[in-house]
Structure formats: structure tokens, C-alpha cells
């Protein structure tokens, strides 16, 4: 049962990302993959729990936490992107790849994100396919860390959305209030932190220490690849943003 379950999850993620690719290709909008990112983890969590050799309280808690995060994130990005043009990052990729975008994007955007989804979900998969009954100190600590991270992401997203909604069209101010006063990317910090919470839930299962690959991977992606760098580059010539950057930590919150 153990080998079959993870293989089924890999196949399901491959098919899921292929369908998302076809939708994005039909819409000529590769930023559709951003909407699908969170729900993809809901798919992994649901399948890993359903196919688990034994359902435990730890498995239920971890799948529920990931489900809440994934659905909330998918809805947030869907609402944010509705009726808007393709995200500038994907538009730039499409231009760079010219006539080969339909093929390159499938591999480098959709399949790669599917692979990353599996890597980041590794603690969740371990919790369900290497089950251990009962919960202990690390599990409670993991729930607490997840709640703090989720709070940073939700509150950060809400504060930014509210700021943009109430900003006048000729207002060039940048968001520097609330959580954004302590970190330039509170939502990304929160997302990285909550996966440390899921990892802590996995520590108690056999080989649980190997689940550290998950928060390390998401932290690296957000800090050095697809999260922070494109946004920082976008405002590289904005004097107000550079002044804000001199006074405010890039990622980790501080006074």
C-alpha cells in the first residue's frame, strides 16, 4: 500500500497541472497557475489522507491545515486576478520564449510547479503514509507555528488589498503600514513559516526529519526565485520604495 499511494499522488498532480496548463493555454494567461497553486496542495492532502494505510489524528490535522491554507490562497489569488491581464512575470516569459512558449511553459512553469508541489508536500505525505498514533509536544508546537504563519499571510494580504482598494488612481504611495511596517513581504514570510509548522507535525513520524526539505524549499523559492526577487526588481527604480527598503527588513519581521 505504501508504494502505491505516493505513486497515485504523483500521477494525480501530473494530470492536475496538465489540465491547468490547457486552461491557461486556452486563456493565453499563464498566471492561471498561481490560482491553481494552493488548491493543488488540497489535492495532495486529500489524496494522501484518503489513501493512507491508517488515518491518524496527526494526518487529519495536517491535511485540514493545508486544506484551509490552499483554498484560502486559491480564492485570494482568483479574486485578485479576476478581470486583470496576465501577470507581468509570465508575460515577460512568454515574450522571451516567443513562438516556443506553448511547449517551454508546459515544462518550465506547470510541470516544474507540480514537482515543487510534491517536494513541499513531502511532510504531509510522510505523516499519512508513515502513520504514528497520538500527538505530542512537537505537534502542538507545529500547530502554533502554522497559526502564526497563516496569520501573517492572511493579515498581510488583507492589509495590502485594502490599501490598493482605497488608494486613488493618482496616488503613488506604497504600502508601509500594519505588518508591512515590519517586513516588506509579510505574506511570503507567513507562507514560509506555516510550512515549518507542517514540518514540526511530521517530526514524530518515522524519518520525519527528512521533511525539512519542505520548508527549506519554499523558503528558498520565496526568497530567491519566484516570490521576493521579481517584486523587488519591479520597484528597483522607485525612490519611495528604496527609502522604504532601507528602513524595513526584506523578509523576516523586525522593528
Image (cartoon, helix red, strand yellow):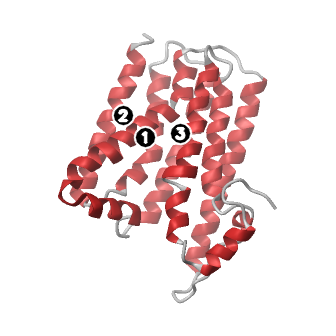
* Circle 2 SS class: helix
Name the residue: 50% across, 69% down. 234
Separation (CA) of disc 3 from disc 2: 15 Å
Asked which quadrant contains residue 89, the reply is bottom left
* Circle 3 SS class: helix
Q: Which tag is nearer the camera, tag 3 or tag 2?
A: 2
Which quadrant holds the N terminus? top left
Asked which quadrant contains residue 60, the reply is top right
Question: Residue 134, percent across and down?
Answer: 70, 17
The tag earlier along the polypeptide, 3 or 2, is 2
Asked which quadrant contains residue 142, the reply is top right
Q: Mark 3 near mark 2, Cβ–Cβ under 8 Å? A: no
Neighbourhood count class around disc 1 (C-alpha, 10 Å): few under 14, some 14–19, many 20 upward = many
Horizontal arrangement in the rendering, residue 130 relative to residue 134 (left or right):
left
Q: For mark 3, what is the residue? A: 67
Horizontal arrangement in the rendering, residue 180 relative to residue 157 (left or right):
right
What residue occupies the far top of the structure in this picture? 1
Q: For mark 1, what is the residue? A: 40
* Circle 1 SS class: helix
Separation (CA) of disc 2 from disc 1: 7 Å
The tag earlier along the polypeptide, 3 or 1, is 1
Q: For mark 2, what is the residue? A: 13
Which quadrant holds the C terminus? bottom right
Question: Residue 168, percent across and down?
Answer: 56, 86
Q: Mark 3 near mark 1, Cβ–Cβ under 8 Å? A: no
Question: Residue 200, percent across and down?
Answer: 68, 29
Name the residue: 40% across, 35% down. 115
Neighbourhood count class around disc 2 (C-alpha, 10 Å): few under 14, some 14–19, many 20 upward = many
The reply to whether residue 154 is visible in this rendering is no
Amino acid at each position: 500500500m505504501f508504494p502505491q499511494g505516493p505513486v497515485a499522488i504523483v500521477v494525480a498532480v501530473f494530470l492536475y497541472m496538465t489540465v491547468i496548463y490547457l486552461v491557461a493555454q486556452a486563456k493565453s494567461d499563464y498566471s492561471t497557475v498561481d490560482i491553481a497553486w494552493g488548491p493543488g496542495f488540497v489535492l495532495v492532502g486529500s489524496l494522501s489522507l484518503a489513501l493512507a494505510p491508517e488515518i491518524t489524528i496527526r494526518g487529519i490535522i495536517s491535511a485540514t491545515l493545508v486544506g484551509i491554507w490552499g483554498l484560502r490562497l486559491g480564492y485570494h489569488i482568483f479574486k485578485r486576478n479576476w478581470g486583470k491581464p496576465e501577470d507581468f512575470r509570465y508575460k515577460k516569459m512568454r515574450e522571451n520564449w516567443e513562438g516556443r512558449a506553448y511547449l517551454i511553459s508546459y515544462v518550465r512553469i506547470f510541470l516544474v510547479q507540480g514537482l515543487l508541489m510534491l517536494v513541499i508536500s513531502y511532510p504531509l505525505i510522510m505523516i499519512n503514509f508513515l502513520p504514528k498514533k497520538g500527538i505530542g509536544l512537537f505537534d502542538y508546537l507545529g500547530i502554533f507555528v502554522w497559526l502564526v504563519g497563516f496569520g501573517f499571510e492572511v493579515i498581510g494580504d488583507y492589509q495590502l488589498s485594502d490599501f490598493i482598494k482605497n488608494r486613488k488612481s493618482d496616488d503613488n504611495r506604497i504600502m508601509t503600514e500594519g505588518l508591512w511596517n515590519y517586513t516588506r513581504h509579510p505574506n511570503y514570510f507567513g507562507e514560509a513559516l506555516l510550512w515549518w509548522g507542517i514540518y514540526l507535525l511530521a517530526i514524530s513520524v518515522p524519518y520525519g526529519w527528512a521533511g525539512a526539505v519542505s520548508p527549506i524549499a519554499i523558503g528558498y523559492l520565496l526568497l530567491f526565485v519566484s516570490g521576493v526577487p521579481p517584486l523587488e526588481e519591479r520597484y528597483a527604480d522607485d525612490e519611495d520604495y528604496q527609502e522604504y527598503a532601507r528602513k524595513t527588513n526584506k523578509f523576516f519581521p523586525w522593528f
